[in-house]
Amino acid sequence: MSRMVLNETSYFGAGCRKELAGELSRRGMKRVFVVTDKDLVKFGVAKKVTDVLDDAKISYEIFDDIKANPTITNVKNGLAAFKKAKADVIVAIGGGSVIDTAKAIGIIAENPEFADVKSLEGVADTKHKSFPVIAFATTSGTAAEVTINYVITDEEAGRKLVCVDPNDMPMIAFNDAEMLMSMPKGLTAATGMDALTHAIEAYITPGATPISDLLTWNSIKFIADNLEAAVKDGSNAAAREGMAYGSYVAGMAFSNVGLGIVHSMAHPLGARYDIAHGVANALLLPYVMEYNKPAASKKYGDIARAMGVDIKGMSEDEAANAAIEAVRKLSKAIGIPQKLNEIGIKEEQLAQLAEDAFIDPCTGGNPRKTSVAEILEIYKRAL
């Protein structure tokens, strides 16, 4: 048996944000609670959406107190602001951090017994669908706008709460290329590699299905064809559009079939050392691919083809190695750090990271059964 949980409606294309007013009108929604972050307000990205609300004379209040790795405190503060706003809908404008925070607020608003936030970890037994959330992606990476997952940091425990809940799916998703143009090169690179990690992990997970394979293979191709161009020239509309599709399509898949230990290993790096999730995934991806090769080499050849490698005449092992090399080559081309020591991680920190990674919910989706000791060895190779 397989299951697909998706948005009710999705919009793509430059300027598609202008459809927001009509969607709100059709649903009789007149008061909006906008969730975003301070940088997106500062650089005028959130304004691209609030201008649509202004033009339609729709009232709104903005909550922008959200960290790059959003915390339980961020969620609780957002929930308090949401209750005061008495809104009809939550409009999230941002990357994964913002949309994940909006999801948590929306879920708790309709399921108040989970107000401690911690109890949402894992597959929470919520009874009611989230308060309506409309998500505007400002990065092409997390695909939070189309997933049933969200991640909140428990600062006291120094760990990330990975939450999985079909009730949290945003009602409407917007991927407007004009809202992606202001992404700086580093963020474009990191979030793009996050999307590639989603696609590759979902492609090789044992839970993959024929439908998810169609999605993930094409996502890998979208990203391989467009990421470097999007990093080099942020105003390249075609590249931005290609990355928007690549990220969203990967999200359609991994949300329904799961991920693997790249994510398990990236999560504690973010929770304990506040390392950006996309950077952590990007750095670890080739090392984990090497580890997983015995369990996934046949599909690695397909990955190589999606990334533009001519594998005719290659053995299965050669094609698999070509896939790993193609990922590493793309990562280097867009300036991703290649070693953990480049981002401040020390050897004495690895043992705790390995323990955290092993108990992460994503570990069960890895194609190769693993252990704390084996995860530690991967960290050491990446150091």
Image: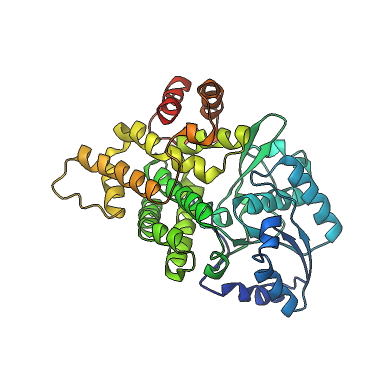
Give me the residue at 23% from left, 43% from top. Answer: 319
Question: Going by the image, does 295 lie left or right of 109?
Answer: left
In the image, is residue 281 above or below residue 212? above
In the image, is residue 342 above or below residue 2? above
Question: Going by the image, does 196 lie left or right of 70?
Answer: left
Report x, y in % for residue 245: 45, 62
Question: Going by the image, does 313 lie left or right of 299?
Answer: left
Total numbered circles? 0
Give me the residue at 82% from left, 54% from top. Answer: 81
Q: How is the image coloured?
A: rainbow
Report x, y in % for residue 107: 71, 50
Report x, y in % for residue 322: 26, 43
Report x, y in % for residue 262: 46, 37
Q: Would residue 37 be visible to someone looking at this image? A: no
Q: Would residue 187 be visible to someone looking at this image? A: yes
User: Residue 348 occupies which quadrant of the picture?
Assistant: top right
Question: Going by the image, does 100 lie left or right of 307?
Answer: right
Give me the residue at 61% from left, 72% from top. Answer: 17
**Residue nearest the viewer, comparing 192 with 170:** 192
